[in-house]
Image (tube, helix red, strand yellow):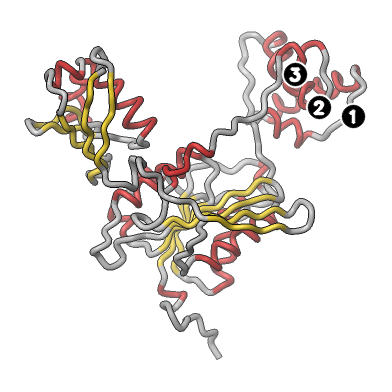
Amino acid sequence: MPRNTSTRSGPRLDTINILIIGAGGLGCEIVKNLVMTGFKRLTVIDMDTVELSNLNRQFLFRVCGKIEDMSDEFYDEFDLVLCGLDSIEARRWVSNHFVSTADPDKQGGIKPIVDGAVEGLRGNVRVIIPTVTSCYECTVSLNSAQPESYPICTIANTPRCPEHCIEWAYMVEWPRQYPDSPLDKDNQDHMQWVHEVALRRARQFGIDEFDYGRTVGVVKRVIPSFAPTNSAIAAYKLATQDALPSNNYLMFNGIEGIFISSLSLDKREDCPVCQSGHRTVRVPRDAVLRDLVSKTLKDEFCIASPSIWLDTGLLYAPAPPRLEMQTRKNLDRRISEVLGDGDDTTLTVFDGAGSKALLLAIKFE
């Protein structure tokens, strides 16, 4: 007797078309759990390459691609998006794309996003319903943590832990021994050299020995990922994928027992992605259009390939190449020159796929 994959309130599992973005440790667990649960229509996309250190938790491999290279028509096919990414910028891109292309008046025009992250025995899951809940950009400021770094004086003179010895080996000793040969973090011979040099330094200062994996983790800034945590987070994704939760952010901690809590992440009133699409920016009167593109549109508003229009015509387009070449000269022109001295000029900004991103009012400082 075939397994019943239908629910009373939703469609059959084998009719839901799911996109999984990110095929690392978490992404592989997502795919496995989806298949075992009864989902049939799965598409996986990832831009990374497989390394030896991946094989303990990543076991599904095909030739994939970059998310930004796919067309709107490609993304229109899906009912649900599950993310297992390790990049803030990639998460911003996904959120920005599905919010900017959301169409509440069209059946299937809103694609729910379920985003997860893991670090060792900890993890979190977030549900984003474009135009309904807060988007990733609303809370991007919460992701301000940087990889731990160590003072160079400590590394060179008074190492106290394995990380100090490893940092010294590849930051100080490698350049001294091989000044004309940059360290290749993907070269196993290079990494083995760093490990052995770091071990010798650890013994010299009475520091406990450590394994090769720890050396790789420090040099590559690898965040440890534990497969059972991946499974748990993937399971939470499945449990929440049909819901519109009031609490849209769930935290999981399995370090000492199991701790789970959830909370609501509210929309940011001035969010450039999910709010009205009308924004006002202040720019110096001597700023050039290139500054607006790189600092405001790309860095602040996370529009990867912005094209800019005035009522009088196109100012800049990143593609196709011929059009980019024709409009490139405007990038080095002062914004005040391009727009005139009026203080109420509005630009229309589109993303690379042609979807309107925002109306941008320019105020000069």
Disc with the residue nearer the chain's start (1 vs 2):
2
Q: Nearer the viewer, residue 198 or 245?
A: 245
Q: Which residue position holds label 1?
A: 208
* Image marks 1 and 2: residues in contact by CB distance under 8 Å: yes
Q: Residues within 10 Å of mark 2 (few under 14, many from 20)?
A: many
Q: Which residue position holds label 3?
A: 169
- CA separation in Å, label 1 and label 2: 7 Å
Q: Tell me the quadrant of the picture where the N terminus can be found.
A: bottom right
Disc with the residue nearer the chain's start (2 vs 3):
2
Disc with the residue nearer the chain's start (3 vs 1):
3
- CA separation in Å, label 2 and label 3: 11 Å
Q: Residue at x 34, y 44 (%)?
A: 273
- Give the percent coordinates (x, y) of residue 158: 83, 14
- Element type at marker 2? helix
Q: Residue at x 44, y 59 (%)?
A: 43
Q: Residue at x 42, y 77 (%)?
A: 10
Q: Tell me the quadrant of the picture where the C terminus can be found.
A: top left
- Element type at marker 1? loop
User: Where on the picture, by quarter, is residue 270?
Assistant: top left
